[in-house]
Image (tube, grey):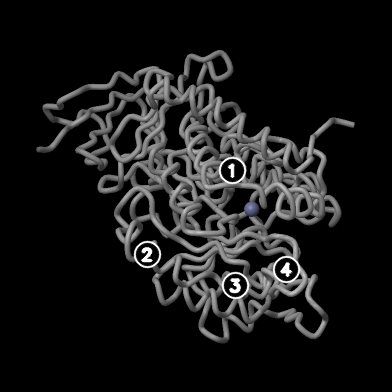
Amino acid sequence: MVKRLLIECGWIVSIDPTIGDLKDAQILIENDKIAEVGININVQPDEVIDASDLIVLPGLVNAHLHTWQTGTKSIGSEWISSDYHKNMHSNLATRFTADDTFLANIMGALNQIDNGTTTILDWCHNLRDIEMAERAIDGLEQSGIRAIFAHGTAKPPSVEGEVPYTHVPHPRDRVEYLRKNRLSNDNKLVTLAMAILGPDFGSFDVAVQDLELAKDLGLLSTAHVWNGYNKNLPKNEQVKDAYIKLGGMGLLGPSHNLVHGCYLPEDQIRYVLDQGCSITSTVMCEMHGHGAFPLMRIVRDMGSIPSIATDTNTLVAEDMFGEIRGALFALRFQINQQARSQGNYPLKNMPVNSREALEWATLGNAKALLLDDKIGSLTPGKKADIIMLRANDTNLYPVHEPVFAITDLANGSNVENVIIDGEFRKRHGKRLYPKKSYEKLRRDLLVSANRLMEESNYHPSAA
Ligand SMILES: [Zn+2]
């Protein structure tokens, strides 16, 4: 039986160019899909949602976060990159159990939903066995979020006599098992991808094997990339033009996602984009401790929509509204600064429109994750992943232009309703996950985080 839900919207920001923005219009949802967007939709609905004081837009997409780190919020506020590896991967991460991973994943996913994100790519790079992977997936599934679970391996410190993680390919048996069993259906809310070491964190040979495996299994692969080669390997193992070689072997394409890429030589950036790969910038995280601009500019210049994401809440907030703002202002600053250094300043127009930043966080991310046929805009036929913001909240009121209100002013506290796959996950400003169970999860997360820090002998303190 078809269930019809009609949303009477104050404002619609559809991110679909054929629909545009609408005032006092409607959205019709049939089961899990958007059936119609327009004015005076003629239908007998089962339920009408009054959203006349709400701004209605597609759910935000967070294309890169390490949900397993949810319990370590902001402890790395003053870490530099090497501290992150020393404190996180070589120490804290080694103490995680399957249950720690579950708690972090469910609480991290619920946090995303609360704050208006309906789809995440969970970059889960601390899995030592199938049980950890299963519990990580449990957390995502139980939250109700749409997620790509990107299976990734741990990066423990080297042990004398053992092969270091840099030279260990992705475990084929584990990924194959998940692909054939629990995550075999790509139409479900949680689907599978591979978070691989790539040429920056593993050896070149491992990158080849991992990309081949992803291809064999028909999976999206994603890699953290900074320089494009692994500086920590002996000189004779460093392959500086790794991405060009991987492309030459036919291993690149739209199903490979690079995260960051800030220090890649420009010819390699252009090459990977030409090959159809996506690049995700985690702008706030990159600006937290790096010295090269995020790559939105070159991605945009080459005709693609940038993809932006929060990355880890160990270092920065996992808040997509903040990321939208950070990315927009970072790109404007970069373009203005370059114009000034070239004597062309001030520019005659604002170099980046606000709407673009909202597109990066919706359609841009959906494209990077190969989900743009399903999500990223309020388009009939796509999944009903929809969020609604209270236009009457003090920080937004009065709304003169909904796009500007979203990009410049909004935050998670404005999120009144969240619908994922046609189901309410937040309604009237309240999370629909059972309150008692949530309170237990919340307490358990604190116990888990405190234990991890105690065992690691790591205790953050502000200077
Ligand atoms: Zn990351």
Q: Which residue is mark 3?
A: 272
Q: Quadrant of residue 45?
A: top left
Q: Can you give x and y, in whole percent of width and height, for residue 5 in the image?
A: 22, 29
Q: Secondary structure at mark 3?
A: helix
The residue mark sitting in front, 1 or 3, is 3
Residue 212 to residue 78: above or below: below
Q: Secondary structure at mark 1?
A: loop
Q: What residue did someone put label 4 on?
A: 264
Left or right: 353, with 106 as reference point: right
Crowd rating for badge 2 (residues with CA inside 10 Å; few <14, some 14–19, many 20+): some
Tell me the amino acid under the disc marked 2. Arg
Residue at image location 39% in from the left, 27% down from the top? 433
> At label 1, which amino acid type do we have?
Asn
Q: CA distance from mark 2 to mark 4?
A: 32 Å
Discs 2, 1 touching: Cβ within 8 Å = no
Mark sitting earlier along the chain (1/4):
4
As measured in the structure, the alpha-carbon distance from the residue carrying label 1 to the one carrying label 4 is 26 Å
* Mark 2 or 1: the one toward you: 2
Tell me the quarter of the image containing the N terminus: top left
